[in-house]
Each structure stands twice: as structure tokens, then as C-alpha cells.
Image (tube, rainbow, N blue to C red):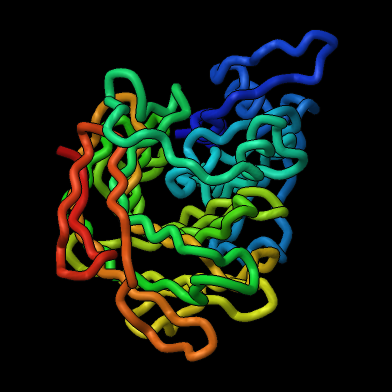
């Protein structure tokens, strides 16, 4: 498949052009812009060979960056339950030059008014058990299905109440099938660290779909949303089913947090600043965005690191959150954050 077709496939978004009367541009038209840009046939978008600095973020060489300006709502992002989808006036897609596979997507610039309002508002999740695949949980509707354990802490913010400075999960994926993967359908088994009331968050976990590979190949990914915008890094790291990979998100002080992998967190993936010093919301579990129902089944074992002492413990508490009759959840072990989840 050509790079143009891959780029075209990756721009599943809502794009509004700054015209005297702003008119919505369809996904096909937005994809067409991206295809022309990748082929060097238009000046509407900027296409340039990626710099060495970005290659340091991604281990893949021979990359292209496609930059688009407009108004974007990134419908395939996987924010924590109750958080808005990332939006902004700048979209950058980093792709492999030879294969066209997407390795990074960034949404920046000024957030749309609605998303900015939601991010600043008190975090309220939709009423549980109301969404179905027939009407919601679709990329086209900007709705996602969740089956998660949610630890929404008391107090917190930045400097008080119940807070944590680290999150680690072992996530087992036993079965994941995303038939609509070529059109961007996505399923993730992951963990989130979030910061109320800022609307900022980080995540890391196992993913299938998202235009890459096939229906059932598993990879690991990580992403963030903060004042610098939203970025997702779609790695080429293969995850084998039933292998219990370890995913870590750790505070490093001064509002910096790091993603790590490995049983002991021995491999630092990347670090990012611009967050609160401590987190007051943890989530783990499954998320799905697809026009039709995918398949997913897995388990998670979760621990947190205490503020100041640095000790690790199982979660103090958790609330189940399932927003679709097609998503199921049960207690995996007698600890609040350890659940079994998936489609049903």
C-alpha cells in the first residue's frame, strides 16, 4: 500500500477550514488533502523529511511529517473515561517513509471551545450501561466503549488530599480481534494516570487495530494530553497474547512523568513534563472504538506508589465503570484494581 493511502487512512477526524462561513470537510476530503501532501502535489499541507531530533523519539528512520492546520477532534484517541477527545488547530502525523505506517500523531494549537470547556469542567462520566454498539461506541459518533476500574481519589489536585506518584500494571490480553482495523477501529487494554481538574493524562498499554498490521496483531503504545496538546506514539513493539507485559507511569518530580516497560521498569520509554506533581485519578481496563463490535478479553493486576514513601501497594479502592451492554467486567483477584474485562 502506498504512503499516500496510509496517510489518507490515518486522518479520521473532524476538520473545519477557516473560511468566511466555516463548512465541515468530510473525512474523505481531509484524507485527500493528506494523500496529495504525501505525494508532494499540494502546498496546502507541509511535508518534510523528519529531523534527527524526532528520530531520537522514534527508533524508525526515514520518516515523514505531515502537518495540517484547521480544527481537529481526534476521534481515535483513547482518553480516560469521562475525558474529552483531544482537539486543536494543528495536526501532525509522523509516518515511515517506506511503509507509510503511522508512528506518531500530535494534536496541538488552540483547543476547540467545547473541548476546552469540558477539560476545565468537573469530571463527570456518562451514565453507565446506556451506550450500545447500535448507537454509540463508534468512531463516527466520537464515542468509545469502556470497561475499567476507576480510582477517583478524594481531595488531591496538587499538594493535598489523596494522591499517588506512580502506577504499574501487568496486563494480560488473551484474545483481541479488530476486523475494521483498516479504517481505524481500535481496541486497547491499558492504564491511565490523570490529573483533575486540569484534564491532563498519560496512558500506556496494549493496542490492536489503528490501521496497522491486521485484525489481531498486538503492539504496545503510549500517549499523553497536557498543555502541549495530545500525542500518541504507536510503537512497532510486538506483544504476544497471554504474556503479562508490565507497563509503568512514574512521577519524576516537578510535574514530570515517565513511561517505562519491563518487570522492574528497567526500560524508560520517554518522559514528559507539564503535569501535576501527583496524580489523583487512576484507571485500568479496556477501551474500544469501532463501527461494529470487536472482540477483546483480558485481565489486569494494578499497583500504585505512595507519595513521599515510594512504597508500592494494591489500589486502596476502585469503582467499576462499564458504559455498554456489550462490555463486561468481573473481579479478577480480591483487590480493587484487578479486574477481568472485554467484550461480551
- Above or below residue 68? Residue 262 is below
Question: Disc count in the image?
Answer: 0
**Which of the pair 164/25 is nearer the observer?**
164
Q: Position of residue 121 (x, y in %)?
A: 62, 42
Position of the N terminus, as image quadrant, is: top left
Q: Confirm whether residue 39 shows in the render.
A: no
Q: Quadrant of residue 331?
A: bottom left
Position of the C terminus, as image quadrant, is: top left
- The extreme bottom residue here reads 309
Residue at 64% x, 63% y is 55
Q: Position of residue 35 (x, y in %)?
A: 61, 27
- Above or below residue 54? Residue 169 is below
Residue at 56% x, 76% y is 251
**Which of the pair 316/180 is nearer the observer?**
316
Residue at 57% x, 62% y is 58
Q: Position of residue 194 (x, y in %)?
A: 52, 59
Q: Position of residue 61 (x, y in %)?
A: 59, 60
Q: Confirm whether residue 266 shows in the render.
A: yes
Q: Quadrant of residue 186?
A: top left
- Above or below residue 103? Residue 240 is below
Q: Quadrant of residue 258?
A: bottom right
Residue at 45% x, 22% y is 140
Amino acid at each position: 500500500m502506498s504512503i499516500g493511502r496510509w496517510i489518507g487512512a490515518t486522518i479520521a477526524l473532524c476538520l473545519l477550514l477557516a473560511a468566511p462561513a466555516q463548512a465541515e470537510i468530510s473525512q474523505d476530503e481531509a484524507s485527500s488533502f493528506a494523500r496529495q501532501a504525501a505525494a508532494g502535489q499540494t502546498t496546502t499541507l507541509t511535508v518534510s523529511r523528519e529531523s534527527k531530533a524526532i528520530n531520537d523519539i522514534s527508533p524508525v528512520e526515514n520518516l515523514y511529517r505531515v502537518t495540517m492546520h484547521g480544527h481537529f477532534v481526534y476521534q481515535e484517541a483513547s482518553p480516560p473515561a469521562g475525558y474529552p477527545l483531544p482537539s486543536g488547530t494543528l495536526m501532525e502525523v509522523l509516518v515511515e517513509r517506506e511503509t507509510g505506517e503511522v508512528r506518531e500523531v500530535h494534536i496541538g494549537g488552540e483547543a476547540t471551545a467545547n473541548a476546552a470547556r469540558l477539560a476545565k469542567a468537573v469530571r463527570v462520566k456518562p451514565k453507565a450501561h446506556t451506550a450500545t454498539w447500535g448507537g454509540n461506541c463508534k468512531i463516527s459518533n466520537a464515542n468509545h466503549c469502556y470497561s475499567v476500574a476507576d480510582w477517583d481519589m478524594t481531595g488531591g489536585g496538587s499538594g493535598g488530599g489523596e494522591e499517588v506518584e506512580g502506577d504499574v500494571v501487568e496486563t494480560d490480553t488473551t484474545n483481541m480481534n479488530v476486523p475494521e482495523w483498516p479504517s481505524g477501529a481500535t481496541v486497547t487494554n491499558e492504564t491511565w494516570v490523570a490529573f483533575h481538574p486540569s484534564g491532563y493524562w498519560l496512558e500506556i498499554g496494549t493496542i490492536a487495530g489503528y490501521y496497522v498490521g491486521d485484525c489481531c496483531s498486538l503492539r504496545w503504545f503510549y500517549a499523553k494530553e497536557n498543555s502541549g496538546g495530545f500525542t500518541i506514539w504507536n510503537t512497532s513493539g510486538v506483544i504476544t497474547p497471554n504474556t503479562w507485559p508490565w507497563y509503568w507511569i512514574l512521577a519524576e518530580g516537578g510535574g514530570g512523568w515517565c513511561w517505562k516497560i519491563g518487570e522492574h521498569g528497567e526500560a524508560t520509554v520517554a518522559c514528559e513534563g507539564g503535569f501535576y506533581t501527583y496524580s489523583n485519578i487512576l484507571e485500568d481496563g479496556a477501551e474500544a472504538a469501532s463501527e461494529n463490535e470487536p472482540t477483546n478479553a483480558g485481565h489486569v493486576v494494578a499497583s500504585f506508589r505512595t507519595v513521599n514513601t515510594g512504597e508500592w501497594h494494591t489500589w486502596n479502592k476502585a469503582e467499576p465503570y462499564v458504559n455498554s451492554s456489550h462490555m463486561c467486567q468481573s473481579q479478577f483477584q480480591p483487590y480493587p484494581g484487578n479486574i477481568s474485562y472485554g467484550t461480551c
